[in-house]
Image: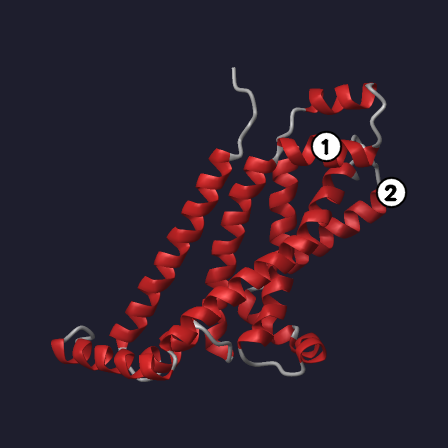
């Protein structure tokens, strides 16, 4: 089977031109806003959880009972181990409870957040553990409270790494959002699967993938530049 004949490419371009009159840009917009919103909510949940994993450690500034810390780690590992497509199906009741339906671009935000916030928590944990412990000990010796150490020492010191990891998170969520097109989510995943794969119109599928790659490059480039620009740490 020849997927890339001139006729197929012509058909693909005609289809995209027709879709542009009926919302091809909307598919791109759906992917963009779903990715950004899901990342924002995932950061909202994952950031405090990641902070808790570091500060609640036995040698942290705010130690938690060992059982609580183990339970948090187990929950994060459990959610991260479930494949996204299966997770989307598992959280259908929660999606219906929050959104009122289990399909469409808005509904896909719920499973995206559930899948992404444990990943974000691990990224935040990794960033915070990079902070020089000597700086934390110095703040403690000066009488700083745990909250002051978190807000004025740990987070400012880890800003460049946090931004880099946020870029990794948003590109990962972008990939998840595209996979969601297989089971009813909108966006470029829907375009690639419904109008490309299901109709054996592979050029449409490839063009959708190209747009996704461009989005990944855009998000990653912005994250890298912000990280470098905001890195105020003194390097010897």
Q: Position of residue 11 (x, y in %)?
A: 20, 82
Q: Position of residue 8 (x, y in %)?
A: 18, 79
Q: Quadrant of residue 161?
A: top right
Q: Residue at x 46, y 68 (%)?
A: 31
In the image, is 25 to the left or to the right of 10? Answer: right
For residue 202, say whether it is visible.
yes
- Please tell me whether residue 15 is drawn above or below residue 75 in the rendered image: below
Q: Which mark is residue 53?
A: none
Q: Quadrant of residue 160?
A: top right
For residue 80, say whether it is visible.
no
Tell me the CA gap for discs 2 and 1: 25 Å
Task: Give the quarter of the figure containing the N terminus.
Answer: bottom left
- N-terminal of the pair, mark 2 or mark 1, is 2
- Which residue corresponds to mark 2? 65
Question: 11 and 232: which one is in front?
Answer: 232
In the image, is 169 to the left or to the right of 206? Answer: right
Question: 199 and 108: which one is in front?
Answer: 108
Secondary structure under tag 2 reads loop
Q: Residue at x 57, y 72 (%)?
A: 108
Q: 10 Å neighbourhood of mark 2: few (<14), some, or many (≥20)?
A: few
Q: Residue at x 72, y 49 (%)?
A: 49
Q: Position of residue 83 (x, y in %)?
A: 56, 64
- Which residue corresponds to mark 1? 152
- Please tell me whether residue 14 is drawn above or below residue 146 in the rendered image: below
- Please tell me whether residue 133 is drawn above or below residue 161 in the rendered image: above
């Amino acid at each position: 089977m020849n997927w890339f004949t001139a006729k197929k490419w012509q058909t693909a371009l005609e289809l995209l031109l027709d879709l542009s009159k009926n919302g091809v840009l909307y598919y791109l917009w759906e992917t963009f806003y779903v990715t950004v919103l899901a990342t924002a909510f995932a950061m909202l949940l994952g950031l405090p959880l990641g902070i808790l994993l570091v500060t609640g450690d036995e040698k942290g500034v705010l130690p938690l009972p060992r059982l609580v810390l183990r339970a948090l780690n187990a929950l994060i590992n459990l959610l991260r181990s479930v494949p996204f497509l299966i997770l989307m199906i598992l959280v259908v009741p929660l999606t219906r409870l929050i959104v009122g339906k289990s399909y469409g671009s808005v509904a896909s935000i719920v499973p995206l957040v559930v899948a992404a916030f444990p990943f974000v928590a691990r990224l935040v944990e990794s960033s915070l553990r990079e902070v020089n412990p000597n700086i934390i000990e110095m703040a403690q010796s000066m009488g700083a409270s745990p909250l002051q150490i978190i807000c004025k020492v740990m987070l400012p010191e880890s800003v460049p790494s946090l931004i880099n990891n946020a870029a990794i998170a948003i590109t990962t969520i972008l990939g998840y959002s595209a996979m969601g097109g297989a089971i009813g989510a909108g966006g470029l995943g829907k375009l690639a699967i419904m109008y490309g794969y299901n109709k054996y119109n592979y050029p449409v599928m490839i063009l959708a993938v190209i747009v996704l790659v461009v989005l990944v490059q855009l998000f990653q480039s912005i994250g890298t530049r912000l990280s470098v620009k905001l890195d105020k740490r003194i390097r010897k």
